[in-house]
Image (spheres, coloured by chain):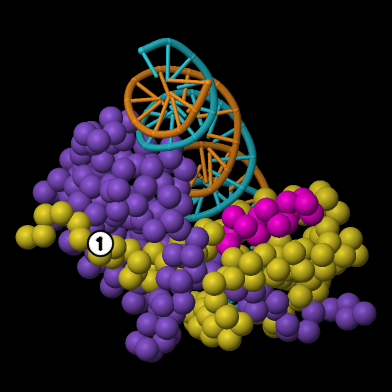
Chain colours: A purple, B yellow, C orange, D cyan
Amino acid sequence: MSQSGDGELHLLDDVGYLLARSSGITVRRTNEALADLGLRVRQYSVLSAACDTGGISQRALSDFLGLDPSQIVALADDLQERGLVERVPDERDRRTRLITPTEAGRQLYAQARAAAEGSSELSLASLTEDERTVLRDLLRRVVTAAVTPVAAAS
Amino acid sequence: MSQSGDGELHLLDDVGYLLARSSGITVRRTNEALADLGLRVRQYSVLSAACDTGGISQRALSDFLGLDPSQIVALADDLQERGLVERVPDERDRRTRLITPTEAGRQLYAQARAAAEGSSELSLASLTEDERTVLRDLLRRVVTAAVTPVAAAS
DNA sequence: GCAAATAGTTGAAACTGTCAATCATTGATA
DNA sequence: TATCAATGATTGACAGTTTCAACTATTTGC
């Protein structure tokens, strides 16, 4: 019958909550870090996948990033208008359009990556380098377990 | 000059991205798990803090959850209309109103907590029990480093 | 007492998540 | 090969989230 709280905040034991909270903290900080470059984390993630693959279908982006296809359309429109990516038709399947980085896109990405990664480090300043590595490895396993292996242009 | 992608997806090395992605996965799943109870993670977190403290000011909620004060207003309105919390005036400071659980709120919270925690486990099924513990401890340190220690009603 | 700070509220704008419907193209199959 | 189901992209809509600015009531410091 404990009527009044006694200092036990269960949210701080809830991995789901902790994920959401720490994600919020880092996303906020990273958005600030990317603001100078005119990017937000969302568009940065699309640009990153486009640069690292050299061209990826919107469907694959949707799966990889966990976003609705309609969100990809909007993000691609935005990046395309700014000349950072192009939509090149896939000859093997004329339905799909590959989101491909332009030279300007690659250059911006290089800068953005430095900014974004620096910002992450800052958000995790309370962890040691080794602990950050452990965290990264654990999270990567959580994420990759939920994602189909990134469609390597069959 | 690597023009085409060679399988190196830098996002999967970016702790910030991994946090956001895994948070998205767990939040989605937890929202589904809470839907039966008419709750979403956001309102669950408010209810949880209210129950665990026995009564917490909206300002403290705002700090603890990392939400704008105006969001707390909306969430408190919602929970109050459903009879899950009350706003009791603080005698020591008539500006503040303590978000306090009702009996119905406490009962729903008990159910919701079980559902939410079960859902987190499910999202982290690719990790062992020990690894989940490590993850929880690391994330808790990240979060608590960014939050003032939960104002114990000075 | 009075000014500055604080707790809560309202309203607005931009961003995000989710879903249904549509069109073009592909793949399977009769 | 004609047709039908499945898939990739797009549009539009609606609820949820984030972030600000402005405002009122109250408290605190001087």
Q: Residue at x 46, y 71 (%)?
A: A141
Q: Residue at x 84, y 78 (%)?
A: A4
State whether residue B60 appears in this view. Answer: no
Start-end of magenta stretch? B26-43
Residue B29 within the magenta-colored segment of the rendering: yes
State whether residue A30 appears in this view. Answer: yes
Q: Residue at x 89, y 60 (%)?
A: B104
Residue behind mark 1: B7
Q: Chain of mark 1?
A: B
Q: How many marks?
A: 1
Give left or right: position of B49 versus A138: right
Picture coordinates of residue A133, whole percent (x, y): 37, 82
Determine the image quadrant of residue B87: bottom right
Using the image, determine if residue D6 lies above or below residue B129.
above
Give left or right: position of B85 versus A94: right
Give left or right: position of A136 versus B22: left
Tell me which amino acid carries mark 1: Gly
Circle 1 — which element? Answer: loop
Picture coordinates of residue B112, whole percent (x, y): 77, 63
Q: Residue at x 59, y 55 (%)?
A: B28
- Pick the quarter of the image with the N terminus of chain A: bottom right
Using the image, determine if residue B16 lies above or below residue C19.
below
Picture coordinates of residue D17, whole percent (x, y): 56, 53
Please name whichever residue, D1 or B19, is drawn nearer the observer in this view of the structure: D1
Using the image, determine if residue A138 lies above or below residue C17.
below
Please name whichever residue, B118 or D29, is drawn nearer the observer in this view of the structure: B118
Determine the image quadrant of residue B27: bottom right
Residue A117 within the magenta-colored segment of the rendering: no
